[in-house]
Image (tube, helix red, strand yellow):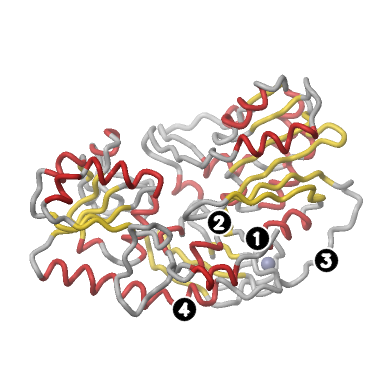
Amino acid sequence: MKSKLQCILCQTDLVGPRLELGKLPPCNRFAAVPEVSTPTYPLALTECSHCSLIQLFDPPPIEALIPQVPWIRYNEPDAHLEAVTSQLLPQLKAPASVFGIGPFDQPLLKKLAAQGLTCKMLDLFALEPKRAIETFPYLETLQARLHPQPMQTLATTHGKSQLLICRYLLEHCRDPLAALDSFRPLLAENGLVLIEVPDSSKFLTRKDYSFIWEEHVCYFTAESFTRLLRQAGYRLFNLMRFEGQLEDALVALVQPLPQTAAPSPMVKEKAPSLFTPYAAAFEKVRDAYQTALAAIQAQGGKIAILGAGHQALMFMHALGLQDFVSYLVDDDANKQAYFTPGAHLPIVSSEKMLADDKINTCLLAVSPRIETKIQEKCAAFLARGGKMYSIFPGSKLYQSPSPQLRYGEDRAEEDKFRCTL
Ligand SMILES: [Zn+2]
């Protein structure tokens, strides 16, 4: 790992403490057959001591993150898009043109199109050169296209819009300032940009390490998000927060200032650091999980993790729990033909887990929204005394691995860190 790197927002040397998770395989590196050795990359999180942006320290090369299977797709929340639409409509007169640029923009485009706006999805992949080896570029590749030159090419083809949408891409960007700069040629005079990112405050406060991900470079709070927007020369019209059980969504409506305007000076964050206590608690949480899972094994129990997404994998890899887990359970048929990255644990259907009466502990790594559905599906497992806990401290089904660790259960503590909009 390099010893000296610069903050991706303010370019100050990143010299602050780091949360080092060791060398981990990329979470999308599912293997059809157990590979002899899966490539691993050091993963570390840090906070810029100057501008307070929490970010990955030296993320893995982009090439290493390109999916090697065609079915890697992620879900992002969309229940709040009705509310977002009603905020946007007074700003846009039909048939104003709206551009979407990423895979999570379609649901909002659809709602705006229903209101008479002229919506178009721009294809950033059209700019991709053909590759010799068959891979399946996704967000890691899209984020790199958010650069002034390729976006200028898109503007030449598609013209300008009154509104550009960018949902759930900015946190993937290795150069978020260049990404924000790249939107300018696609905007008509007085054009707006809607940017949505996840707010990291909840998982940081709850000491939830499953939310770290080699593909998320920036870990925003409302403060660091607005600081970035200002630094990129945007005027903030409106910042909306939509509550989520595990993480909130931050939706900013911004407008570029003339490029001649000097960027506002970087001001240091006034809120207490969320990163310092998060990094400090890591070893305690890791040790508590290892002890708790070892005790289940010692009593003859077997453990499965249900939900084979990147959060399940990061939970297992970052906390060093691979040796305690028998397999992962996922009813996505695509995944059942594969082994987990690095540890090569099988991925099986929930039916298979139900038929395996040795499994007595099932750790849920799914959205709290579908936990009840999972409990219903696994009623036979619960009926025979099987225990089901969520890995997320924000879930009602969460159980702390140790009575000494109560993170995520103190809402007053969380509120202390919540910055108001
Ligand atoms: Zn910085």
The numbered dot on residue 280 is: 4
Q: Between marks 1 and 4, how big is the CA–CA gap?
A: 23 Å
Binning the other alpha carbons within 10 Å of mark 1 as few (below 14), some (14 to 19) or many (20 upward) gives many
Q: Between marks 3 and 4, how big is the CA–CA gap?
A: 30 Å
Counting every numbered tag in the picture gives 4
Q: Between marks 3 and 1, how big is the CA–CA gap?
A: 16 Å
The numbered dot on residue 217 is: 2
Q: Quadrant of the C terminus?
A: bottom right
Q: Earlier in the sequence, mark 3 or mark 1?
A: 1
Q: Residue at x 52, y 44 (%)?
A: 140
The answer to whether mark 1 is within 8 Å of ligand 1 is yes
Q: Is residue 359 above or below residue 276?
A: above
- Measuring from the top left, give residue 196's x and y in whole percent: 63, 45
Q: Amino acid at mark 4?
A: Ala
Q: Observer-nearest residue: 92 or 322?
A: 92
* Relative horizontal placement of residue 228, taking residue 220 as reference (left or right): right
Residues under numbered marks 1 and 2 in contact, where contact means CB atoms less than 8 Å apart = yes
* Relative horizontal placement of residue 149, taking residue 394 as reference (left or right): right
Q: Which residue is mark 3?
A: 265
- Residue found at the far right of this picture: 260
Question: Element type at marker 2?
Answer: loop
Q: Earlier in the sequence, mark 3 or mark 4?
A: 3
Question: Element type at marker 4?
Answer: helix
Q: Observer-nearest residue: 64 or 287?
A: 287
Q: Observer-nearest residue: 18 or 354?
A: 354
Q: Earlier in the sequence, mark 1 or mark 2?
A: 1
